Image (spheres, rainbow, N blue to C red):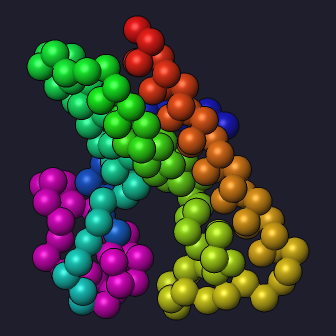
Amino acid sequence: MVRFPAADNRHFTGVYICMRCNGKQRSPSGKPPAKCRKCGAKRFRLKRLVLGTAFIISAFGIYYLVQSNGLDRTFLLMLFPVFSLGFLSVLEAKGSFCVANGLNGTYNIDAGEQEINSVSDRAKDKMKAFEIVIISVAAAAVATGIIYFI
């Protein structure tokens, strides 16, 4: 599938998700909306792609701090969990799939969290969740290794 930067900006920039009903709301000002249009809740989160890129950028910030302060290179191994969470969040956002729900055998669509009744569907979701976790851990290991051995 081809990705377009303009479409990615439209889908992810300034989009907030309600913590109660998972409703999407756009906020061009950069701060979260005052309340949800659907349920009236006041707690929002950014779409996960933003969260994942923030983790990845913060990993490079940690790298800069370790290098500039002359700390021991073993501190660079702290980048592994940060990269893992960053890649996991990005993969979840790109695939529109929640790893936590996939591993628990549940889904969360408008009406709240419900269990998956079909055994085959539950197995597929768990396999997809494991696949995303393994890919994110492998990517984090590669990124940490590259930075550590530079």
Q: Position of residue 147 (x, y in %)?
A: 40, 18
Q: In this rendered view, identify the residue nearer to me: 21 or 115.
A: 115
Q: Nearer the viewer, residue 140 or 8?
A: 140
Q: Residue at x 30, y 29 (%)?
A: 75
As drawn, 62 above or below 132 = above
Residue 139 in view in this figure: yes
Which residue: 73% across, 66% down? 125
Q: Is residue 85 above or below residue 27?
A: above
> Which residue is pictured at 40% across the width and 84% down the height?
21
Residue found farthest to the top: 150
Residue 54 percent across, percent down from the top left: 29, 43
Q: Which residues are magenta?
A: 18-39
| 89, above or below 74, in the image | below
Residue lying farthest to the right in this orientation:
120
Question: Magenta: predominant secondary structure element?
Answer: loop
Quadrant where the C terminus sits is: top left
Between residue 89 and residue 75, name the one nearer to us.
75
Quadrant hosting residue 9: top left
Residue 5 vs residue 107: left or right? left
Confirm whether the magenta stretch covers residue 80: no
Q: Is residue 120 left or right of residue 107?
A: right
